[in-house]
Image (spheres, grey):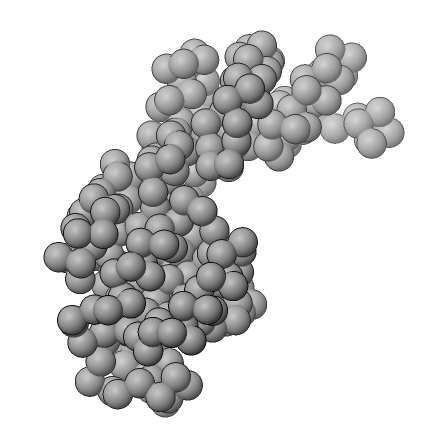
Amino acid sequence: YLIKFKPSVVHCHDTTVLPIGVVMSFFYNYTIIYDAHELESNRNGQGKFFSSVVFYLEKILWKRIDIFISVSDSIIEWYNTKLGPKKSCLILNSPDIKIIENHKNDENAYYFHNLFNINKDRKIFIYLGIIGEGRGIHKYIEVFKNNSFNADIVFVGYGELTNYVKESSKIFKSIHYHNPVKHDEVVSLVKSADYGLCFIENISLSDYFCLPNKLFEYAFSGLTIIGSDFPEIRKVVQDYNLGYTTKPEVSNMISLI
């Protein structure tokens, strides 16, 4: 395709295609955009060997990149510090959706209460996204399985720990699972909750510096956010008065909730 179309700009979507974009740039004169959706050399589920390979690959190819895109200021700063200053662009994981106001005033306000037969005086905490390792799933279960507070948790999503959540929901009345929904249906669903949970675990630099989709989806749904006290999450939550942050440990989570 590069040979056929001879583009003036090549957008390298993640590290895997970056070498192709760089090698072909020696034959065709075009602008290279490197779009790193995470801190690619230090992320969840990636072994040390592969992390090292990715880092040195980025280091070797970095000089040929014209514009760098990533999803948080901290990740961009890390790249500029470790690999050298680069013209950069921040693009948040923020969905292009309408902001919802007065989310408890419409007919779907008690969707989760009605679906799971929950008393309407109980607060709903929602977890949205991948139900996998590093997302605090085990900790959420520990917090809500025998809770003394007047609240339930609803998991919406999919992943390797989906069955674990489903089994837990059969044992504990305050834990519920909801099938994932289409992207454009997320806000209308989420707005029937009260609090959005965004406790990412500090298992990689990419996680520590992240600004996940769910944070913005909670915000646009009118929910109060309860999240990890990590630099980027804390900054957004505090700057826009969106909720609260604390260390992603069970005792801290219970205390804050």
Q: Which of 22 and 193 is in front in this view?
A: 193
- Tell me what residue is drawn at x 39 percent, y 84 percent: 116
- Answer left or right for 59 relative to 146: right
- Quarter of the figure with residue 143: bottom left
- Quarter of the image with the C terminus is bottom left
- Quarter of the image with the N terminus is top right
Q: Which of 127 and 187 is in front in this view?
A: 127
**Which residue is outermost to the front?**
171
Looking at the picture, does residue 97 appear above or below residue 136?
below
Q: Which of 109 and 197 is in front in this view?
A: 197
- Quarter of the figure with residue 16: top right
Q: Can residue 29 be seen in this view?
A: no
Looking at the picture, does residue 168 appear above or below residue 117?
above
- Residue 18 location in percent, x, y? 65, 24
- Quarter of the figure with residue 50: top right
- Tell me what residue is drawn at x 73 percent, y 11 percent: 26
Looking at the picture, does residue 217 appear above or below residue 85?
below
Q: Can residue 251 be seen in this view?
A: yes
Looking at the picture, does residue 72 appear above or below residue 29?
below
- Residue 238 location in percent, x, y? 18, 48
- Residue 63 location in percent, x, y? 55, 11
- Residue 5 location in percent, x, y? 82, 31
- Answer left or right for 55 relative to 237: right
**Which residue is outermost to the right?**
4
- Answer left or right for 31 relative to 221: right
- Tell me what residue is drawn at x 31 percent, y 85 percent: 118
- Tell me what residue is drawn at x 21 percent, y 69 percent: 147
